[in-house]
Amino acid sequence: MLPEEKLLKLIRKDSKQQSGGDAAPVSRIKPVFVFLSRVHAPVLSVRFAVMFLFVLSCVYFLSEVIYPFVGLQKINAAFDPPDNGDPGAPALPDLKPFQYYLDGIANRQVFKVSCAGNPESFVSTLGPESIRDFSLVGIISGDNPQAIIQDNKTQKTYYLNKGQSIAEYTIEEVLSDKVILNAGGQRYEFFL
């Protein structure tokens, strides 16, 4: 007897003992198919979920496109307050015609600089010709900020603190992006 035949006989004998006698031998291929079907089950459910989301988004898109044409009612241009005859109802404000508001806007000077109430708070950005001889070169921030101002005529640079002067101008305020100068009660701004 060949060794292959002995092995085959031994395998058949083991399979008969496990199955309990005359029963057919158990196939080892079946569990492999069960395993593969379990592996593909989540893939199928993910595919189903993606397909469901796609269909749902298509339905939403179509409803958003169709709704403005179907769902909206025409809006009345004229305002008719309801006259329910209730004396306790709040009174509606007196509505004026559109032209009244249009004239009010047209006559208002929106870009006019105003110093109403406190003329000292008015800051001019344009000054006399002598202020144009100076330019703000930089600002040194810190506890005691300094303005770096250059005299364009003499090409000299000055490092000035609050309260110091250059020509007839006194440094009133040194901020992070500008310096405010004061000359005879008139205020001027220098920007970086």
Image: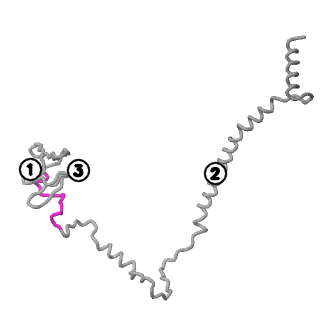
Q: Is residue 122 magenta?
A: yes
Q: Is residue 138 visible?
A: no
The residue at 77%/36% (across/down) is 34
Q: Nearer the viewer, mark 3 or mark 2?
A: 2
Q: Which mark is residue 166?
A: 1
- Disc 1 + disc 2, Cβ < 8 Å: no
Q: Is residue 76 above or below residue 128?
A: below
Q: Is residue 148 magenta?
A: no
What is the crowding at mark 3: few (fewer than 14 residues within 10 Å), some, or many (at least 20)? few
Question: How far apart, in angstroms, are the residues tagged by discs 3 and 2?
Answer: 53 Å
- Disc 3 + disc 2, Cβ < 8 Å: no
The residue at 66%/51% (across/down) is 52
The residue range painted magenta reads: 118-132
Q: Is residue 12 above or below residue 181?
A: above
Question: What amino acid is found at the position of numbered circle 2 in the picture?
Answer: Leu
Residue indicated by mark 3: 177
Residue 95 spot, x, y in % from top left = 40, 81
Q: Earlier in the sequence, mark 3 or mark 2?
A: 2
The type of colouring in the image is: one colour
Q: Secondary structure at mark 2?
A: helix
- Farthest top residue? 1
Q: Secondary structure at mark 3?
A: loop
Q: Is residue 159 visible?
A: yes
Q: Is residue 73 above or below residue 61?
A: below
Question: What amino acid is found at the position of numbered circle 3 in the picture?
Answer: Asp
- Disc 3 + disc 1, Cβ < 8 Å: no
The residue at 19%/45% (across/down) is 142
Residue indicated by mark 2: 53
Name the one closer to the observer, 93 or 108: 93
